């Protein structure tokens, strides 16, 4: 860690802690800490103006509300993505595998692991962003059996009608 000499001149070395927020983004907690520090270290002979203080409180309140709205929109967006993925169950989809190859199959289920949506297709787990095409509902065994019965009935009707 970097060190520096105590500015008072005592000759003591002090250690500086690395920044806690490496991305440089301030949140509502940081804003509140700054405001409290400002109040603690204000000049008693020249206190903070009431209008300034109220303005800062209003900014803090606005920041908190914007943060809450943003978090709510993130949750709503994720919920919508899960819902869209669930809507793919039973449909044939084409997708790109992690190795770049193309594949297709029927979406069987949807799971969420560590905040990531995964669509189960055969032995593959596909992220929604990797889905390239979506087809109609896949034919089930029941649909195939029904088609066979209809064909048999049509054949019997044709045989009965023949002289």
Image: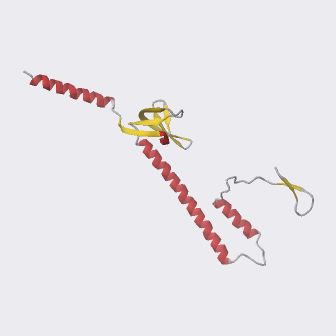
Measuring from the top left, give residue 136's x and y in whole percent: 35, 38
Q: Residue at (29%, 31%) from the top-left corner?
A: 143
Identify the residue shown where x is 48% and y is 42%.
128
Residue nearest the viewer, comparing 42 with 132:
132
**Up/down of 132 relative to 18, above or below:** above
Q: Position of residue 52 (x, y in %)?
A: 66, 75
- For the C terminus, the quadrant is top left
Front position in the image: 52 or 39: 52
Please name the residue shown 41% across and 39% down the image: 133
Relative image position of residue 83 (x, y in whole percent): 44, 46
Residue occupying the far left of the picture:
163
Q: Residue furthest top?
A: 163
Q: Quadrant of residue 27?
A: bottom right
Q: Nearer the viewer, residue 101 or 127?
A: 101
Q: Is residue 74 above or below residue 163?
A: below
Vertically, is 43 above or below 125? below
Q: Residue at x 70, y 52 (%)?
A: 22
Up-down: is 147 above or below 58?
above
Looking at the picture, the colour scheme in use is: secondary structure
Q: Is residue 163 left or right of residue 130?
A: left
From the viewer's perspective, is 160 left or right of 27? left
């Amino acid at each position: 860690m970097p060190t520096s000499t105590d500015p008072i001149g005592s000759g003591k070395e002090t250690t500086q802690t690395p920044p806690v927020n490496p991305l440089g983004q301030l949140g509502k907690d940081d804003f509140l800490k700054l405001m409290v520090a400002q109040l603690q270290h204000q000049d008693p002979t020249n206190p903070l103006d009431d209008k300034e203080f109220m303005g800062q409180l209003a900014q803090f309140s606005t920041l908190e509300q914007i943060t809450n709205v943003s978090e709510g929109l993130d949750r709503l967006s994720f919920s919508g993505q899960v819902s869209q993925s669930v809507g793919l169950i039973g449909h044939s989809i084409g997708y790109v595998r992690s190795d770049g190859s193309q594949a297709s199959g029927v979406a069987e289920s949807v799971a969420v692991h560590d905040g990531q949506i995964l669509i189960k297709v055969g032995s593959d787990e596909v992220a929604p962003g990797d889905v390239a095409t979506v087809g109609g509902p896949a034919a089930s065994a029941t649909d195939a059996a029904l088609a066979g019965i209809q064909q048999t009935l049509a054949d019997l009707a044709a045989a009965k009608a023949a002289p």
